[in-house]
Amino acid sequence: MLCKSGINGEEVDLHHQKGNYIYRTRVMMLALTFMGFAVACFVLSNSLPRPYMISKIFATDSAFRSGINKTSLDIVLKNASMKDKTVIITTLNDAWAKPNSIFDLFLESFHIGKNTQRLLNHLVVICLDEKAFSRCLALHPHCYQLHTKFNFSRDAFFMTPDYLEMMWGRIKFLAVVLEMGYNFVFTDTDIMWLRDPFPRFYPHADFQIACDFFFGNSYNVNNRPNGGFAYVKSNSKTIQFYNFWFYSRKWYPRRHDQDVLNKIKHHEFMSKIGLQLRFLDTAYFSGFCQRTRDLGLVCTVHANCCVGLENKVHDLQVLLHDWRRFMSLDPIMQLPNSSWSVPQDCRTSFQRGYSRKGD
């Protein structure tokens, strides 16, 4: 249909004019949609963990890194290192270093364990205060004092600010060790070493970790890991992983490292970097949460699922007594179904529903 417009008497095809309007509207909507999609992609891409971004943020955490003298640390690590640059690392504060406490039991387990005494030559104790450092030097050759602005000398109650700072500080420190080119077995001090664990490690895994609860398959990410014991090889994948782990605490505030690990173990970033992750069987790497029944297999036992220093000390003393009795038997009498007398005090403490450092 034709009609006269009011401008210069030109004839305009109204259908054509309407078509142009619709076309322009669609183009504008498509442009806005594209812009929205681009903005969303930008925001998403900047929220995803990229190795260079994580490393940059991690490197700026000078409050912790200023407490590490890499030169003196490297001397200690080198003196304790195996031929392949592997060390065993534990952390120690004054509360756990006192005579007849956790540290004494920890060292004793190496002395009475099967093929474990030689591993003391490769144990590095990271001391969190001066008293722990002095006590370590009196008992062990490879001690390193970490200087921080925080007071870690007390027994840190579970989920308090001191506890969280201690746990996340541990992750940061271990990342530094990886960056320095050292493989490590990290062990909490309330873990008793009863057999050499190295034959039970998976040879091709980058990161392997003990469990509170193990469900029968070392690849199953639904296993419940415990950050108190892990064997980690130094390579680009594990360095990125530890940086990612530490960075992820920003997504899960007021959570400790183990809780965050349970979140990020499903993250696509893990597959993107190609990390070979395995979970250690509690038949060999046991604890009070899920005990092994076979003393003929067990390598380590962790006083996890346990509340309080005194309860840990009591039950670990009983555990070492059980172990001595088992090892004193004639090999023919060392039955696979021999059982522990523990947990005792730890069982009742766990039922009260509280937790502390090292749980």
Image (cartoon, helix red, strand yellow):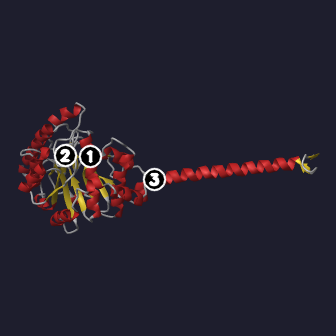
334 lies left or right of 17: left
111 lies left or right of 29: left
Residue at numbered disc 1: 165
Residue at numbered disc 3: 48
Question: Quarter-wise, where is residue 143 in the image?
Answer: bottom left
Label 3, residues with CA under 10 Å away: few <14, some 14-19, many ≥20: few
Question: Quarter-wise, where is residue 255 in the image?
Answer: top left
* Amino acid type of the residue that numbered disc 2 sits on in the rendered structure: Phe
Proximity of marks 2 and 3: CB atoms separated by less than 8 Å: no
Q: Residue 51 location in percent, x, y?
A: 40, 59
* Amino acid type of the residue that numbered disc 3 sits on in the rendered structure: Leu
Q: Residue 220 location in percent, x, y?
A: 36, 49
Image quadrant holding the C terminus, namely top left
Q: For the point 22% across and 34% down, which residue is it?
A: 350
* Amino acid type of the residue that numbered disc 1 sits on in the rendered structure: Glu
Q: For the point 36% across and 61% down, which residue is it?
A: 237
Dot 1 lies on which element?
helix
